[in-house]
Image (cartoon, helix red, strand yellow):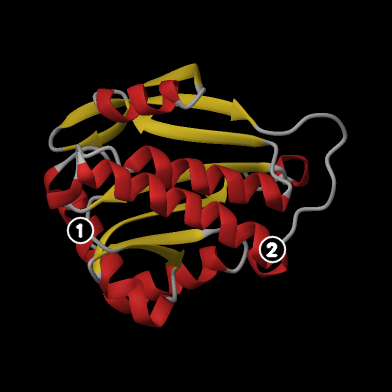
Amino acid sequence: MSVRIRFAEPERDAAGILAVYAPYIEKTEITFETEVPALAEFTRRVAGISAGFPYLVLEIDGELAGYAYAHRQAERAAYAWNAELSIYLAEGWRGRGMGAPLYRLLEALLAMQGYVNLYGVITASNRTSIAMHERLGYRQIGLHEKTGWKFDQWHDAAWLHKRVGAGVPGPVLTPDALDGAQVGRAIAAAQREIEEKLKM
């Protein structure tokens, strides 16, 4: 199988990304979003995030099989080195070990940018995602009890944290300011790892 990871292009990819995301909105409490956004709005969302953070799409044999991205964790200036991460895989590609390599790549790119603190905010019932985060070195730092109302019930949200930097932080770079060769090597390594997973 042919595996390709690349940065999302909003106009080209928003419809495919939204097709992966919509079932999570409509059928699960994994996201607390309750209505599928209009494509134009979602395209603007992808573009806005992509300006400052990695927004990765995973293609397998040309099919958009999943995506991962980060965004600002909080707005105050002192939080500028924090990022919140998300990952979604298309229904036919879940449970095949592809999430962790894609997520590690996202982490590596954020570290290259200068981010220090990475956060995952996960619906507490999503034990699979929490377990993946823990395997990747995240530590649960809190639980917001009964914080999201969806499908006629309250849901808890677990907060997980991982530090990828130390000391006095430097400037945060935009994705397009990163060293292209370094980024290319990181992407190639993640692609190879996913290819190996698909052979199993």
Q: Can residue 178 be seen in this view?
A: yes
* Of residues 135 and 122, the one drawn nearer to the viewer in this rendering: 135
Residue 44: horizontal and vertical position, in percent? 44, 74
Frontmost residue, 24 versus 90: 90
Element assignment for label 2: loop
Q: Is residue 63 left or right of residue 102?
A: left
Kind of element beneath mark 1: helix
Q: Alpha-carbon neighbours of circle 2 within 10 Å: few (<14), some, or many (≥20)?
A: some
Query: Quadrant of the image for the N terminus?
Result: bottom left
Q: Residues within 10 Å of mark 1 (few under 14, many from 20)?
A: some
- Residue placed at 61% from the left, 59% from the top? 183
Q: Name the residue under label 2.
A: 174
Q: Nearer the viewer, residue 133 or 191?
A: 191
Q: Which amino acid type is marked by label 1? A: Ala
| Residue found 34% across the figure and 47% down from its top | 194
- Expressed as whole percent of the image width and height from the top left, the position of residue 109 reads 60, 51
In the displayed structure image, the side of residue 112 where residue 86 appears, left or right: left
